[in-house]
Image (cartoon, rainbow, N blue to C red):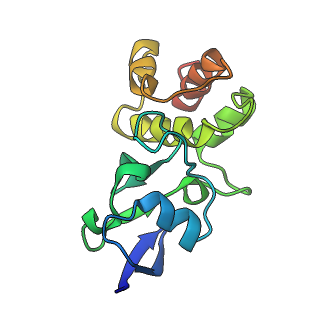
């Protein structure tokens, strides 16, 4: 039987109906709410393409059951991080550094980087690389991604 839930997604109430409490948050975000920032990559929480923020923390939405979210949890996706008119500093830096090639990993890279910068505003290159070590990019734009995070932190 479907369970109604109300999520706080990108600062807005998002009522959803979930048939299975183990449904991954990623499926609710993409299929029910039509958000396309978080991507399905590996389905095991190992690639980072599905990363979103839950109460300011980077979370792999493909392995986060929607039922595990606390009431009032604030979920932010790539769409809610910034806008076309006013992109988040990390989004602007990724654009300036042309850090995206195919674009598949970029959601996770940006969301993980934004979480890092909120905890550590001026990370060194080693800290950036460590924070992004579990986010996979098969295109090889790692250098541009690191430069984008440095640019967003004002350390480039």
User: Image height check: is 60 above or below 55?
Assistant: above
- Residue 10 visible somewhere in the drawing: no
Residue at the spot 36% in from the left edge and 50% down from the top edge:
63
Residue at the spot 41% in from the left edge and 13% down from the top edge:
126
Residue 52 at x, y = what percent? 46, 51
- Residue 43 visible somewhere in the drawing: yes
Q: Nearer the viewer, residue 21 or 104?
A: 21
The tally of labels here is 0
Left or right of residue 57, residue 138 in this image:
right
Left or right of residue 97, residue 78 in this image:
left
Q: Image quadrant for the N terminus?
A: bottom left
Left or right of residue 27, residue 39 in this image:
right
User: Image height check: is 32 above or below 68?
Assistant: below
Q: Nearer the viewer, residue 107 or 68?
A: 68
Outermost residue toward the front in this view = 1
Residue 58 at x, y = what percent? 38, 45
Residue 96 at x, y = what percent? 74, 31
User: Image height check: is 141 above or below 16?
Assistant: above
Residue at the spot 58% in from the left edge and 38% down from the top edge:
90
Q: Nearer the viewer, residue 72 or 39?
A: 39
User: Image height check: is 124 above or below 60?
Assistant: above
Residue at the spot 62% in from the left edge and 68% down from the top edge:
34
Quarter assignment of residue 156: top right
Q: Nearer the viewer, residue 150 or 20?
A: 20
């Amino acid at each position: 039987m479907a369970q109604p839930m109300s999520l706080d997604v990108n600062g807005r109430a998002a009522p959803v109906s979930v048939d299975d409490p183990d449904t991954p948050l990623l499926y609710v975000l993409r299929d029910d709410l039509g958000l396309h920032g978080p991507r399905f990559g590996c389905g095991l929480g190992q690639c980072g393409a599905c990363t979103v923020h839950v109460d300011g923390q980077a979370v792999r939405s493909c392995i986060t059951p929607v039922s595990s979210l606390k009431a009032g949890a604030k979920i932010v996706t790539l769409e809610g991080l910034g806008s076309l008119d006013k992109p988040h500093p990390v989004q602007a830096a990724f654009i300036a550094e042309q850090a995206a090639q195919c674009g598949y990993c970029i959601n996770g890279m940006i969301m993980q980087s934004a979480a890092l910068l909120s905890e550590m505003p001026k990370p060194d290159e080693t800290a950036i690389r460590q924070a992004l070590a579990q986010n996979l990019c098969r295109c090889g734009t790692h250098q541009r991604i690191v430069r984008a995070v440095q640019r967003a932190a004002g350390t480039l």
